[in-house]
Image (cartoon, helix red, strand yellow):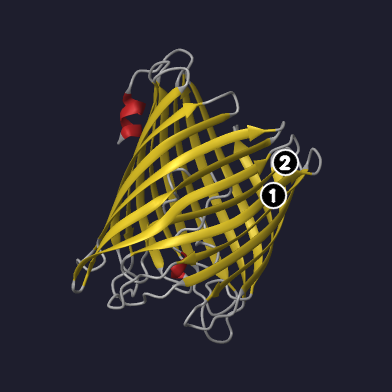
Amino acid sequence: MVVAWALLGGGSAQAETRASINTSLTGELASNPYLLSGPSTSAASAVVTVSPAVKFLDGSKTIGLNATYKHSEFSRRYRSSNDILASASLSQKLSPRLNYSADLGYNNSVVGANDLLTFGANPPSGGAFPPLPGDIALAGLRQRRQSFTGGLNLGYTASARDNFHVQGGFSLVRYPSGSVASEYDSTSGSFGYSRILSSRASVGLNVGVSRSDYRRTTIGDATTISPQLTFSTKFGATWSASASLGVSHSKITGPLGRYGQNSASGSINLCNAPSSGKFCLFASRSVQPTSFGGTVRPQTSIGASYSVRLDAKSSINANANYSRSGQVNQTAIPNNGSFDYGQASLNYSRRLSQRLQGNLTASFADSYRDPTPRKANMMFGFGLSYAFGDMR
């Protein structure tokens, strides 16, 4: 709605439109692409992806429209699948002191072994690279999930040293009828203040509030308040660090009434970004809604990422992380035990021409402390991608 309003507004003579389509064809060999239990889980697959994008630039305003269609065909056992993702974003600087951004997103896809990474709300103080895992307890679900997400961010510069920001967002998660996964609606908001101490350091305070409502039941509904102190700094020519530390207090509706649950929360990010690449270590702990277990859970993640440009045409990207969806301190809540998930991937890409690129990928994913025995997923893939239009 925000994007539609902006598109209908008047444009200036300096307005610019950039349109592009990125296409790819990938062949993969995977030992357990959906982290299922039982024998005969391996399969080869061919994946076709088409991703159109349009960007409008008009002075201080930027509008982005993106979509992705992915079709997968498997050699055995699994049905073909069609996944759709769409998003719209708007950012604008209203004055030298005030700016805002808004986004809407839609995801309709089947949950696989490596699809647990980019879904779900990361902590407001995040900044990790790449994004931290989302609802990892969905390992082995292999069901279609629809999610609708949206967010609004406001930033205000009160002085040369003082900054305020306000954030709000929502997430609606749906599954096919008869699914064992829990559907929920989640809303969140936060208010933050930061003060610049020097050209290399700043401190601040962030207070977040979230509400999770599970559909067709009141059991598991939760309200969480998370105050955190924040700190960021730069040292040396290429190093930077940021950290937040606080506590999350959740009020959860159980079968016998409401009860409280406290857990530590926060994040740490340490990055080195020389001219040829980037290396990051990150850790995070936050309370997140989950579709497995029917309530919110504290989730802890640690990981590392590395990217390097080998030459003008070649680059390598690698990442690894390990996450735990924590225990719910209420025996009357079903599936209240903890659950672990680990993932690692390595990608080599080489530009074959101005618009054609080749990729080699290897990845590993597995669940741990899992009541259901599963084989790990090891995947090897080769792909080609071709870009049309303006890819800036």
Ranked by sequence position, the earlier of labels 2 and 1 is 2
Left or right: 260 as drawn, with respect to 128: left
Judging from the image, what secondary structure is the residue with disc 2 in? strand
Say whether residue 391 is visible: no
Question: Could you tell me which residue is drawn at 33 percent across and 66 percent down?
Answer: 175
Q: Which residue is the site of mark 2?
A: 277
**35 or 169: nearer the viewer:** 169
Residue wearing tag 1 = 306
How many callouts does the rendering have?
A: 2
Work out whether residue 390 or residue 308 is closer to the camera in this orientation and state it: 308
The percent coordinates of residue 197 (x first, y second) are 53, 26
Residue 373 in percent (x, y) is at 53, 83
Asked if residue 38 is positioned above or below residue 259 in the image, the reply reads: below
Q: Is residue 270 something that shows in the picture?
A: yes
Report the residue that reaches farthest toward the top.
Answer: 13
Name the residue type under label 1. Answer: Tyr
Circles 2 and 1, Cβ within 8 Å, touching? The answer is: yes
- Near-viewer residue (372 or 258): 258
Identify the residue at image location x=51%, y=61%.
115
Q: Is residue 291 left or right of residue 213?
A: right
Residue depicted at x 41% and y 44%: 228
- Drawn side of residue 109 relative to residue 182, left or right: right
Three-letter amino acid code of the residue under disc 2: Gly
Q: Residues within 10 Å of mark 1 (few under 14, many from 20)?
A: many
